Image: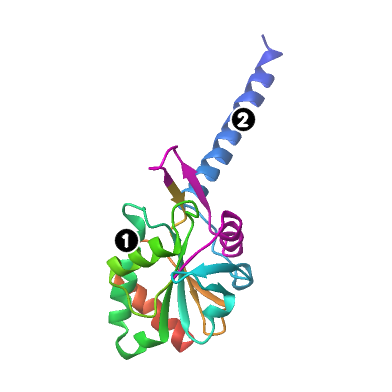
Amino acid sequence: MEKSLPRQRLLLIAACALGLVLAGVVALNAGLFRPAPSAGAVGGPFQLVDQDGKPVDEAILKGKWSVVFFGYTYCPDVCPGTMQALRGAVDQLGPKGKDLRIVFISVDAGRDTPTKVKDWLAVQDLPADTVGLTGTPQQVAAAARAYRAVYEIQGDGPDYQVNHSTAAYLMNPRGRFDRVLAYGLTPEQMADQIRRAMRGD
C-alpha cells in the first residue's frame, strides 16, 4: 500500500494538469482567454472577395484606420451586437468617424457568399464605406491565421453554428495592427480607444 501512494499522487497531479490544459484550450477557442498579441503578430497578406464579388487583398486596409472583425452573417448575437457597437463608435467619433472603416470578414465560407454578406451589412445599417469580405474555405482560414482569429463549425446540416473569437482589431492607415478592441465594449469605450490610437496614445 505504501508503494502505491506516490503513483496515485502522480496520477492525480497529471490529471489536474491535463484538466487545466484542456480548460485553457476550450477557453481559447471560445474567445474567452487570449494573450494580448504583439504589434507584429497580427495582420498580414490575404486574398478574399468583397461584397460585390471583387477580389481584394490586404491593401484594402491602407489609407484609413480600419476595424477588422471576424464573424458570420448567421451569427445570432455577437456579430450583430459588435456591428452595432462599431456603428455607435463611428457616431461618437464625430468628424473623425470619416477616417475609420469597418471591415467584416466572414468565417463561414460555406454559406456567406458575397451577396449574402452584402445583404447582411445593409440590414446592419453601417457606414457606406463598410467592407464585407468572404472567400473559399482556404482563403478564409489563411486570413484568420494572419489575424490570430479562431473559429470552429459546430453541428451538422444547414443550420450549423460557428464558434469564433470575438475581438476586433484596430489597424492603422498603413494597414498595421494597433490594438485589440475587446468584445463587450460600449460604443463610447470603443470610440475612446480609437480616439487614443488616432492621437498616438
Residue 95 colored magenta? no
Residue 93 visible to the viewer: yes
Q: How many marks?
A: 2
Secondary structure state at the residue bearing disc 1 = helix
- Point out the stretch of residues depicted in magenta: 132-161
Give above or below for 167 relative to 197: above
Taking the image as shown, residue 108 lies to the left or right of residue 97, namely right
Q: Position of residue 174 (x, y in %)?
A: 57, 84
Q: Position of residue 175 (x, y in %)?
A: 56, 79
Q: Position of residue 73 (x, y in %)?
A: 38, 57
- For disc 1, the neighbor class at 10 Å (few under 14, some 14 to 19, many from 20) is some
Residue found farthest to the right: 3
Residue 123 badge = none
**Quarter holding the N terminus?**
top right
Front residue of 105/182: it is 105
Residue 141 colored magenta? yes
- For disc 2, the neighbor class at 10 Å (few under 14, some 14 to 19, many from 20) is few
Q: Tell me the kind of residue under disc 2.
A: Ile
Badge 2 is on which residue? 13
Give above or below for 146 relative to 22: below
Secondary structure state at the residue bearing disc 2 = helix
Residue shown at 42%/57% (left/top)?
72
Q: Position of residue 19 (x, y in %)?
A: 55, 34
Could you tell which of marks 1 and 2 lies nearer the N-terminus? 2
Closer to us: mark 1 or mark 2?
Answer: 1
Quarter of the view holding residue 98: bottom left
Residue 80 badge = 1
Are the residues flagged by discs 1 and 2 in contact, CB closer than 8 Å?
A: no
Taking the image as shown, residue 134 lies to the left or right of residue 79, namely right
Give above or below for 134 relative to 189: above
